Image (tube, grey):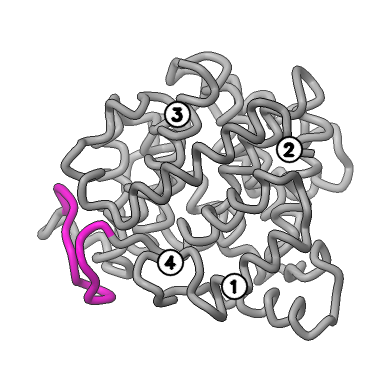
Amino acid sequence: MSLQTKWKAAILGHAVGDALGVPVEFRPRSYLKKHPVSGMQGYGTYHLPKGTWSDDTSMTLATIDSLQHGFDARGIMDRFCAWANDAAYTPYEEVFDMGMATRQALLRYLSGQAEPVQCGGAGEMDNGNGSLMRILPGVFYCKARFSGERFFSEGIKLLHSLSDLTHAHPRSEMACGIYACVASALLDCRRKESVFEGLAKAKRVYEADSRFQPEMVHFERLMQPGFLSLPEADIRSSGYVVDTLEAAIWCLLTTDNYSDCVLKAVNLGEDTDTVAAVAGGLAGMLYGLDAIPEEWLAVLAKRQWIEELCDRFAANVFNGTAD
Protein backbone atom coordinates (compact mmCIF):
# COMPACT_ATOMS: atom_id res chain seq x y z
CA MET A 1 0.00 0.00 0.00
CA SER A 2 1.09 3.57 -0.65
CA LEU A 3 1.68 6.00 2.20
CA GLN A 4 -1.48 7.82 1.13
CA THR A 5 -3.58 4.63 1.30
CA LYS A 6 -2.17 3.73 4.71
CA TRP A 7 -2.88 7.29 5.85
CA LYS A 8 -6.63 7.11 5.39
CA ALA A 9 -6.77 3.59 6.86
CA ALA A 10 -4.86 4.78 9.94
CA ILE A 11 -7.06 7.82 10.57
CA LEU A 12 -10.32 5.97 10.06
CA GLY A 13 -8.93 3.08 12.10
CA HIS A 14 -8.21 5.55 14.90
CA ALA A 15 -11.67 7.16 14.71
CA VAL A 16 -13.51 3.83 14.64
CA GLY A 17 -11.53 2.55 17.63
CA ASP A 18 -12.38 5.75 19.48
CA ALA A 19 -16.10 5.41 18.67
CA LEU A 20 -16.15 1.77 19.78
CA GLY A 21 -14.75 2.79 23.15
CA VAL A 22 -16.83 5.90 23.87
CA PRO A 23 -19.99 4.15 25.13
CA VAL A 24 -18.08 2.14 27.73
CA GLU A 25 -15.43 4.63 28.77
CA PHE A 26 -14.52 4.24 32.47
CA ARG A 27 -16.15 0.80 32.67
CA PRO A 28 -13.91 -1.60 34.62
CA ARG A 29 -12.53 -4.72 32.99
CA SER A 30 -14.63 -6.88 35.30
CA TYR A 31 -17.82 -5.35 33.86
CA LEU A 32 -16.68 -5.84 30.26
CA LYS A 33 -15.80 -9.46 30.95
CA LYS A 34 -19.50 -10.00 31.65
CA HIS A 35 -20.74 -7.56 28.98
CA PRO A 36 -18.09 -7.53 26.24
CA VAL A 37 -18.27 -5.05 23.40
CA SER A 38 -18.58 -6.93 20.10
CA GLY A 39 -19.48 -4.10 17.74
CA MET A 40 -20.51 -0.50 17.43
CA GLN A 41 -23.04 0.54 20.05
CA GLY A 42 -24.51 3.79 21.25
CA TYR A 43 -25.42 5.74 24.36
CA GLY A 44 -23.75 4.31 27.47
CA THR A 45 -21.32 6.64 29.26
CA TYR A 46 -22.22 9.84 27.41
CA HIS A 47 -25.67 8.87 26.06
CA LEU A 48 -24.64 9.53 22.46
CA PRO A 49 -25.50 7.70 19.21
CA LYS A 50 -23.50 4.89 17.61
CA GLY A 51 -20.38 6.05 15.85
CA THR A 52 -19.70 9.04 18.12
CA TRP A 53 -16.02 9.78 18.59
CA SER A 54 -14.42 11.77 21.38
CA ASP A 55 -11.67 14.31 22.02
CA ASP A 56 -9.12 11.77 20.77
CA THR A 57 -10.41 12.16 17.23
CA SER A 58 -11.41 15.83 17.57
CA MET A 59 -7.84 16.83 18.44
CA THR A 60 -6.47 14.49 15.77
CA LEU A 61 -8.65 16.16 13.13
CA ALA A 62 -7.67 19.62 14.35
CA THR A 63 -4.03 18.57 13.99
CA ILE A 64 -4.66 17.28 10.47
CA ASP A 65 -6.33 20.53 9.50
CA SER A 66 -3.33 22.54 10.66
CA LEU A 67 -0.52 20.25 9.48
CA GLN A 68 -1.85 20.21 5.93
CA HIS A 69 -0.43 23.74 5.74
CA GLY A 70 2.86 22.87 7.49
CA PHE A 71 3.94 22.70 11.11
CA ASP A 72 2.76 25.82 12.94
CA ALA A 73 2.44 25.41 16.70
CA ARG A 74 0.27 28.49 17.05
CA GLY A 75 -2.02 27.34 14.26
CA ILE A 76 -2.50 23.96 15.95
CA MET A 77 -3.24 25.56 19.31
CA ASP A 78 -5.74 27.94 17.69
CA ARG A 79 -7.57 24.94 16.28
CA PHE A 80 -7.48 23.15 19.63
CA CYS A 81 -9.05 26.24 21.18
CA ALA A 82 -11.70 26.33 18.45
CA TRP A 83 -12.54 22.77 19.43
CA ALA A 84 -12.57 23.46 23.17
CA ASN A 85 -14.48 26.76 23.04
CA ASP A 86 -16.61 26.54 19.88
CA ALA A 87 -17.05 22.76 19.44
CA ALA A 88 -15.20 22.74 16.11
CA TYR A 89 -14.03 19.29 14.99
CA THR A 90 -16.74 17.54 17.02
CA PRO A 91 -19.34 15.01 15.86
CA TYR A 92 -22.40 16.94 17.06
CA GLU A 93 -21.22 20.46 17.96
CA GLU A 94 -20.68 19.39 21.56
CA VAL A 95 -17.48 18.92 23.58
CA PHE A 96 -18.16 16.12 26.04
CA ASP A 97 -14.68 14.95 27.00
CA MET A 98 -11.48 16.89 27.73
CA GLY A 99 -8.45 15.93 29.78
CA MET A 100 -7.38 18.18 32.62
CA ALA A 101 -3.81 18.59 31.34
CA THR A 102 -5.13 19.61 27.94
CA ARG A 103 -7.57 22.07 29.48
CA GLN A 104 -4.81 23.67 31.55
CA ALA A 105 -2.49 23.95 28.54
CA LEU A 106 -5.18 25.67 26.48
CA LEU A 107 -5.87 28.10 29.32
CA ARG A 108 -2.15 28.96 29.48
CA TYR A 109 -2.19 29.60 25.75
CA LEU A 110 -5.35 31.71 25.76
CA SER A 111 -4.13 33.80 28.67
CA GLY A 112 -0.80 34.46 26.98
CA GLN A 113 1.18 32.86 29.80
CA ALA A 114 3.46 30.94 27.45
CA GLU A 115 4.42 30.32 23.86
CA PRO A 116 2.56 27.36 22.29
CA VAL A 117 5.32 24.76 22.74
CA GLN A 118 5.72 25.81 26.37
CA CYS A 119 2.03 25.43 27.30
CA GLY A 120 2.08 21.75 28.18
CA GLY A 121 2.57 20.65 31.75
CA ALA A 122 6.03 19.24 32.48
CA GLY A 123 5.50 17.68 35.90
CA GLU A 124 5.41 14.04 36.91
CA MET A 125 1.62 14.17 37.12
CA ASP A 126 1.30 15.58 33.60
CA ASN A 127 1.81 12.23 31.89
CA GLY A 128 -1.69 11.45 30.75
CA ASN A 129 -2.25 10.13 27.23
CA GLY A 130 -3.55 13.43 25.81
CA SER A 131 -0.69 13.98 23.34
CA LEU A 132 -0.25 10.33 22.38
CA MET A 133 -3.91 10.12 21.37
CA ARG A 134 -3.48 12.88 18.73
CA ILE A 135 0.09 12.29 17.52
CA LEU A 136 -0.80 10.10 14.51
CA PRO A 137 -1.07 12.92 11.92
CA GLY A 138 2.32 14.18 13.02
CA VAL A 139 3.85 10.77 12.31
CA PHE A 140 2.61 10.82 8.72
CA TYR A 141 3.64 14.46 8.30
CA CYS A 142 7.18 13.63 9.45
CA LYS A 143 7.27 10.45 7.41
CA ALA A 144 6.48 12.45 4.28
CA ARG A 145 8.89 15.26 5.11
CA PHE A 146 11.92 13.47 6.59
CA SER A 147 13.43 10.50 4.77
CA GLY A 148 15.62 7.78 6.21
CA GLU A 149 17.42 8.56 9.45
CA ARG A 150 16.17 12.15 9.40
CA PHE A 151 12.81 10.81 10.55
CA PHE A 152 14.47 9.61 13.77
CA SER A 153 16.37 12.83 14.37
CA GLU A 154 14.50 15.83 12.99
CA GLY A 155 11.12 14.10 12.80
CA ILE A 156 11.10 12.82 16.35
CA LYS A 157 12.09 16.27 17.63
CA LEU A 158 9.15 17.80 15.78
CA LEU A 159 6.84 15.20 17.33
CA HIS A 160 8.19 16.09 20.77
CA SER A 161 7.22 19.71 20.05
CA LEU A 162 3.78 18.54 18.97
CA SER A 163 3.41 16.72 22.29
CA ASP A 164 4.68 19.75 24.20
CA LEU A 165 1.64 21.81 23.22
CA THR A 166 -0.28 20.01 25.97
CA HIS A 167 2.09 17.42 27.51
CA ALA A 168 5.71 18.51 27.86
CA HIS A 169 7.17 15.96 30.28
CA PRO A 170 9.97 13.89 28.69
CA ARG A 171 7.96 10.71 29.37
CA SER A 172 5.05 11.94 27.27
CA GLU A 173 7.42 13.07 24.53
CA MET A 174 9.09 9.68 24.63
CA ALA A 175 5.80 7.79 24.43
CA CYS A 176 4.94 9.74 21.29
CA GLY A 177 8.41 9.03 19.88
CA ILE A 178 8.18 5.29 20.58
CA TYR A 179 4.76 5.19 18.96
CA ALA A 180 6.24 7.01 15.95
CA CYS A 181 9.08 4.50 15.64
CA VAL A 182 6.61 1.61 15.69
CA ALA A 183 4.37 3.33 13.17
CA SER A 184 7.34 4.09 10.92
CA ALA A 185 8.33 0.43 10.92
CA LEU A 186 4.79 -0.62 10.03
CA LEU A 187 4.67 1.93 7.23
CA ASP A 188 8.00 0.73 5.82
CA CYS A 189 7.12 -2.96 5.99
CA ARG A 190 3.55 -4.16 6.37
CA ARG A 191 4.25 -6.97 8.83
CA LYS A 192 3.20 -7.23 12.44
CA GLU A 193 6.73 -8.31 13.34
CA SER A 194 7.88 -4.83 12.29
CA VAL A 195 6.63 -3.63 15.67
CA PHE A 196 9.69 -5.19 17.31
CA GLU A 197 11.98 -3.43 14.83
CA GLY A 198 10.30 -0.15 15.69
CA LEU A 199 10.70 -0.73 19.42
CA ALA A 200 14.36 -1.63 18.98
CA LYS A 201 14.94 1.53 16.98
CA ALA A 202 13.21 3.63 19.64
CA LYS A 203 15.41 2.06 22.30
CA ARG A 204 18.54 3.06 20.39
CA VAL A 205 17.26 6.58 19.76
CA TYR A 206 16.43 7.32 23.39
CA GLU A 207 19.36 5.51 24.99
CA ALA A 208 21.62 7.83 23.02
CA ASP A 209 19.98 10.98 24.41
CA SER A 210 20.95 11.93 27.96
CA ARG A 211 17.73 13.88 28.44
CA PHE A 212 15.67 10.72 28.02
CA GLN A 213 17.95 8.14 29.62
CA PRO A 214 16.33 8.52 33.09
CA GLU A 215 12.93 7.82 31.51
CA MET A 216 13.99 4.51 29.94
CA VAL A 217 13.02 2.62 33.07
CA HIS A 218 9.35 3.44 32.51
CA PHE A 219 9.40 1.78 29.08
CA GLU A 220 11.64 -1.11 30.01
CA ARG A 221 8.87 -3.70 30.04
CA LEU A 222 7.63 -2.66 26.60
CA MET A 223 11.15 -3.03 25.18
CA GLN A 224 11.74 -6.53 26.54
CA PRO A 225 11.29 -9.64 24.34
CA GLY A 226 8.79 -11.12 26.79
CA PHE A 227 6.32 -8.25 26.43
CA LEU A 228 4.29 -10.16 23.84
CA SER A 229 3.79 -13.03 26.27
CA LEU A 230 2.40 -10.95 29.13
CA PRO A 231 -1.05 -12.10 30.27
CA GLU A 232 -3.96 -9.70 30.01
CA ALA A 233 -4.00 -9.35 33.79
CA ASP A 234 -0.61 -7.62 33.58
CA ILE A 235 -1.77 -5.07 30.99
CA ARG A 236 -3.09 -1.80 32.39
CA SER A 237 -5.46 0.37 30.37
CA SER A 238 -5.60 3.59 32.36
CA GLY A 239 -5.12 7.13 31.07
CA TYR A 240 -1.45 7.12 32.09
CA VAL A 241 0.54 7.46 28.87
CA VAL A 242 2.78 4.43 29.49
CA ASP A 243 -0.24 2.23 30.21
CA THR A 244 -2.00 3.39 27.05
CA LEU A 245 1.03 2.83 24.83
CA GLU A 246 1.67 -0.62 26.29
CA ALA A 247 -1.97 -1.68 26.02
CA ALA A 248 -2.33 -0.50 22.41
CA ILE A 249 0.83 -2.26 21.23
CA TRP A 250 -0.03 -5.41 23.21
CA CYS A 251 -3.46 -5.55 21.56
CA LEU A 252 -1.86 -5.18 18.14
CA LEU A 253 0.69 -7.91 18.82
CA THR A 254 -1.75 -10.43 20.29
CA THR A 255 -4.36 -10.27 17.50
CA ASP A 256 -4.33 -10.90 13.76
CA ASN A 257 -6.86 -8.47 12.32
CA TYR A 258 -8.23 -4.98 12.81
CA SER A 259 -11.51 -5.93 14.45
CA ASP A 260 -10.01 -8.21 17.07
CA CYS A 261 -7.34 -5.63 17.89
CA VAL A 262 -9.70 -2.74 18.62
CA LEU A 263 -12.29 -4.90 20.39
CA LYS A 264 -9.58 -6.34 22.60
CA ALA A 265 -8.48 -2.78 23.39
CA VAL A 266 -12.00 -1.68 24.29
CA ASN A 267 -12.66 -4.70 26.46
CA LEU A 268 -9.60 -3.99 28.59
CA GLY A 269 -11.79 -1.35 30.21
CA GLU A 270 -11.05 2.03 31.83
CA ASP A 271 -9.77 4.47 29.15
CA THR A 272 -11.48 2.46 26.45
CA ASP A 273 -11.74 5.12 23.75
CA THR A 274 -8.12 6.24 23.84
CA VAL A 275 -6.56 2.79 24.06
CA ALA A 276 -8.73 1.63 21.16
CA ALA A 277 -7.99 4.79 19.15
CA VAL A 278 -4.21 4.41 19.57
CA ALA A 279 -4.41 0.69 18.78
CA GLY A 280 -6.82 1.34 15.92
CA GLY A 281 -4.49 3.77 14.18
CA LEU A 282 -1.70 1.18 14.19
CA ALA A 283 -4.05 -1.62 13.13
CA GLY A 284 -5.45 0.52 10.33
CA MET A 285 -2.03 1.13 8.83
CA LEU A 286 -1.12 -2.56 9.25
CA TYR A 287 -4.25 -4.20 7.84
CA GLY A 288 -5.62 -1.52 5.53
CA LEU A 289 -8.94 0.20 5.03
CA ASP A 290 -10.68 -2.92 3.71
CA ALA A 291 -10.05 -4.62 7.07
CA ILE A 292 -12.23 -2.12 8.95
CA PRO A 293 -15.80 -3.49 9.00
CA GLU A 294 -18.04 -1.47 6.72
CA GLU A 295 -20.89 -1.64 9.23
CA TRP A 296 -18.68 0.25 11.67
CA LEU A 297 -17.61 2.82 9.09
CA ALA A 298 -21.21 3.28 7.96
CA VAL A 299 -22.26 4.72 11.33
CA LEU A 300 -19.08 6.69 12.01
CA ALA A 301 -20.08 10.30 12.68
CA LYS A 302 -19.06 12.71 9.88
CA ARG A 303 -17.24 9.98 8.01
CA GLN A 304 -17.38 11.85 4.68
CA TRP A 305 -15.97 15.01 6.24
CA ILE A 306 -13.15 13.04 7.88
CA GLU A 307 -12.27 11.45 4.55
CA GLU A 308 -12.34 14.81 2.78
CA LEU A 309 -10.02 16.28 5.41
CA CYS A 310 -7.70 13.30 4.97
CA ASP A 311 -7.71 13.79 1.21
CA ARG A 312 -6.79 17.48 1.53
CA PHE A 313 -3.95 16.61 3.91
CA ALA A 314 -2.71 13.94 1.50
CA ALA A 315 -2.81 16.32 -1.46
CA ASN A 316 -0.84 18.97 0.39
CA VAL A 317 1.58 16.90 2.48
CA PHE A 318 2.29 13.82 0.39
CA ASN A 319 2.57 15.89 -2.79
CA GLY A 320 5.01 18.25 -1.10
CA THR A 321 3.06 21.51 -1.06
CA ALA A 322 2.98 21.88 2.74
CA ASP A 323 5.88 23.82 4.24
Is there any visible trace of residue 271 in the rendered image?
yes
User: Residue 285 bears which disc, if any?
Assistant: 3
**Residue visible at 21% across and 52% down in the picture:** 299
Residue 68 x %, y %: 65, 44
Give, as a single range, the part of the protein colored magenta. 37-51
**Residue visible at 60% across and 52% down in the picture:** 65
Q: Earlier in the sequence, mark 3 or mark 2?
A: 3
Amino acid identity at mark 3: Met
Badge 4 density bin: few <14, some 14–19, many ≥20, Cα 10 Å = many
Amino acid identity at mark 4: Thr
On the image, numbered disc 4 is attached to which residue? 90
Residue 133 x %, y %: 53, 54
Give the alpha-carbon distance from disc 1 to disc 2, as whole Å: 22 Å
Amino acid identity at mark 1: Ala
Is there any visible trace of residue 196 in the rendered image?
no
Image depth: mark 1 or mark 3 in front: 1
Quadrant location of the C terminus?
top right
Q: Nearer the viewer, residue 30 or 55?
A: 55
Give the alpha-carbon distance from disc 1 to disc 3, as whole Å: 29 Å
Residue 165 x %, y %: 73, 62
Q: What element carries label 4?
A: loop
Badge 3 density bin: few <14, some 14–19, many ≥20, Cα 10 Å = many
Badge 2 density bin: few <14, some 14–19, many ≥20, Cα 10 Å = some
On the image, numbered disc 2 is attached to which residue? 322
Q: Earlier in the sequence, mark 4 or mark 2?
A: 4
With 226 as the anchor, is 209 left or right in this view? right
Q: Nearer the viewer, residue 85 or 193?
A: 85
User: Residue 82 bears which disc, if any?
Assistant: 1
Q: Which of marks 1 and 2 is nearer the N terminus?
A: 1
Q: Earlier in the sequence, mark 3 or mark 4?
A: 4
Q: Is 287 situated above or below 53?
A: above
Q: Is mark 1 on a helix, strand or loop?
A: helix
